[in-house]
């Protein structure tokens, strides 16, 4: 029964001998005949892609070259042309209160920050030594006064003796020599009186100086102001013979002086009387205004840079301005308000002469060069007196760095979009 059914063998390869013995028909297989057509079609497609990429790149670069500009509309605003500098705040007046006599500092009657008036007691020096000197001088004067009585009595006696000798000589009862001796004695007595009077005046001057020194033991404020510093302490010995020792410093803080450091390149732009103002780090929104009072002729050199000091005063009624504050100073040369303005980068030519050119972008996208009249300008913006109208668009600059036109214009278009593929 098993041999009645034929045996089935799946996927059995033909014997090699039979394949080699198969007669040749002379034609290539179909797969080999289709290869040249596919290669030509691929080359054509690559050529079309390359041409399209080249055209797209050329078109993109053309757009980038023509459209990559920065524009801005003409608007109204305020313009200020000023010279900037950095300065420090100092009191308009300050005095170092010192001691004119030597001695021990007995007491200090003020503290830092106290308000004092002119003539108020600031400190006191021990006066015992000076009082002793006064007593000695008074006693010496009394001694000289007693000696003066004796000397003047000698003068009276010499005068009487001279008169007697003159009478005797006239009656030929005395020698001429006796008269001469009487004259000499009177002259000596009067000279002694004159010398004693000179000694008395000298001693009186010493007494006066001692009393003045006694007055200097009490130290008073020479002006009304604020005590900003105390340099000596109670019990300290002061020596006024070599230099005047400072006890305290009093400053008038009701008006502050700004000492601005201006470079030699800008100092020629300043003139006394011009408007000036400054701001502080702690009060950025507050402006303190004044007028330039003085430019010191002697400069200072810092790191090989020559700086001149320009001074102007500002009132300080509230006391918010303090010594040695750092101020950002502005010396105003020109100032205009509510005028047409454009960025300085939009100006072509030399705007310092009052004339310049700008590139205007019309509503249809075309551009034209236009003459304008320039007024006040600074490093950022310039005033346009004529040649432009509010709302017109001017070219400020061109895009750089390979940025796309959209990114160069600063809008929200195709920012950051890469160029088309090749």
Image (cartoon, rainbow, N blue to C red):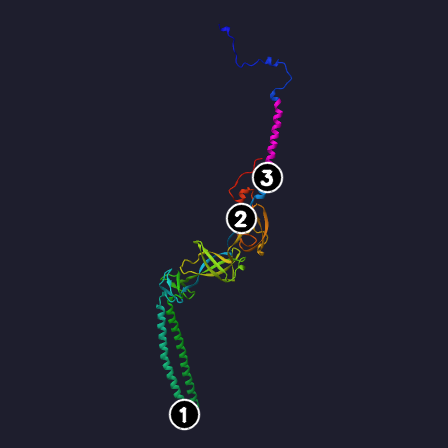
Q: Mark 3: which secondary structure?
A: helix
Query: Range of the magenta residues?
Result: 33-59
- In the rendered structure, the answer to whether residue 26 lies left or right of residue 77 reads right
Q: Nearer the viewer, mark 2 or mark 1?
A: 2
- In the rendered structure, the answer to whether residue 369 lies left or right of residue 252 reads right
Q: CA distance from mark 1 to mark 3?
A: 147 Å
Which one is earlier in the sequence, the residue at label 2 or at label 1? Answer: 2
Residue behind mark 1: 167
- Note whether 410 is above or below 260 in the view shown: above
- In the rendered structure, the answer to whether residue 108 lies left or right of residue 403 reads left
Q: Position of residue 280 (x, y in %)?
A: 44, 55
Residue behind mark 2: 72
Q: Position of residue 351 (x, y in %)?
A: 57, 54
- Note whether 98 is above or below 416 in the view shown: below
Q: Identify the mark at residue 59; answer none if there is no mark.
A: 3
Q: Quadrant of residue 399?
A: top right
Q: Mark 2: which secondary structure?
A: strand
Please give the name of the residue rendered at 54% of the width and 47% of the height, measured from the top-left corner. 71
Q: Residues within 10 Å of mark 3 (few under 14, many from 20)?
A: few
- Note whether 181 is above or below 85 in the view shown: below
Q: Is residue 40 inside the magenta stretch? A: yes
Please give the name of the residue rendered at 42% of the width and 89% of the height, measured from the top-left corner. 179
């Amino acid at each position: 029964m098993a041999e009645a059914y034929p045996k089935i063998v799946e996927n059995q390869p033909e014997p090699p001998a039979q394949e080699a013995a198969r007669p040749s028909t002379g034609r290539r297989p179909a797969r080999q005949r289709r290869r040249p057509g596919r290669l030509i079609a691929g080359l054509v497609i690559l050529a079309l892609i390359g041409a399209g990429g080249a055209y797209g790149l050329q078109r993109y670069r053309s757009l980038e070259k023509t459209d990559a500009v920065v524009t801005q509309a003409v608007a109204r605003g305020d313009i200020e042309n000023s010279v900037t500098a950095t300065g420090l705040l100092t009191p308009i007046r300050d005095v170092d209160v010192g001691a004119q006599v030597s001695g021990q500092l007995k007491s200090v009657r003020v503290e830092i920050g106290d308000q004092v008036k002119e003539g108020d007691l600031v400190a006191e020096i021990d006066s015992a030594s000076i009082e002793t000197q006064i007593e000695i001088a008074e006693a010496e004067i009394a001694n000289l006064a007693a000696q003066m009585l004796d000397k003047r009595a000698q003068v009276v006696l010499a005068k009487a003796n001279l008169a007697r000798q003159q009478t005797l000589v006239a009656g030929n009862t005395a020698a001429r020599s006796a008269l001469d001796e009487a004259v000499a004695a009177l002259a000596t007595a009067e000279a002694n009186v004159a010398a004693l009077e000179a000694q008395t005046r000298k001693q009186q001057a010493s007494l006066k100086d001692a009393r003045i020194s006694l007055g200097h033991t009490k130290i008073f404020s020479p002006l009304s102001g604020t005590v900003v510093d105390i340099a000596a302490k109670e019990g300290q010995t002061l020596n006024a013979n070599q230099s005047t020792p400072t006890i305290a410093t009093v400053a008038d803080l009701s008006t502050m002086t700004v000492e601005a450091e201006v470079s030699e390149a800008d100092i020629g732009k300043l003139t006394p009387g011009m408007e000036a103002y400054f701001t502080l780090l702690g009060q950025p929104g507050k402006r303190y205004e004044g007028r330039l009072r003085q430019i010191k002729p002697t400069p200072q050199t810092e790191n090989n840079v020559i700086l001149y000091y320009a001074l102007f005063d500002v009132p300080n009624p509230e006391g918010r301005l303090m010594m040695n504050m750092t101020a950002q100073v502005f010396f105003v040369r020109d100032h205009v308000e509510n005028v047409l303005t454009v960025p300085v980068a939009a100006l072509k030519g030399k705007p310092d002469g009052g004339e310049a050119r700008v590139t205007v972008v019309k509503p249809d996208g075309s551009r034209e060069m236009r003459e304008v009249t320039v007024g006040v300008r600074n490093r950022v913006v310039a005033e346009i007196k004529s040649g432009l109208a509010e709302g017109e668009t001017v070219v400020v600059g061109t895009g750089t760095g390979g940025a796309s036109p959209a990114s160069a214009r600063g809008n929200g278009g195709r920012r950051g979009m890469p160029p088309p593929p090749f």
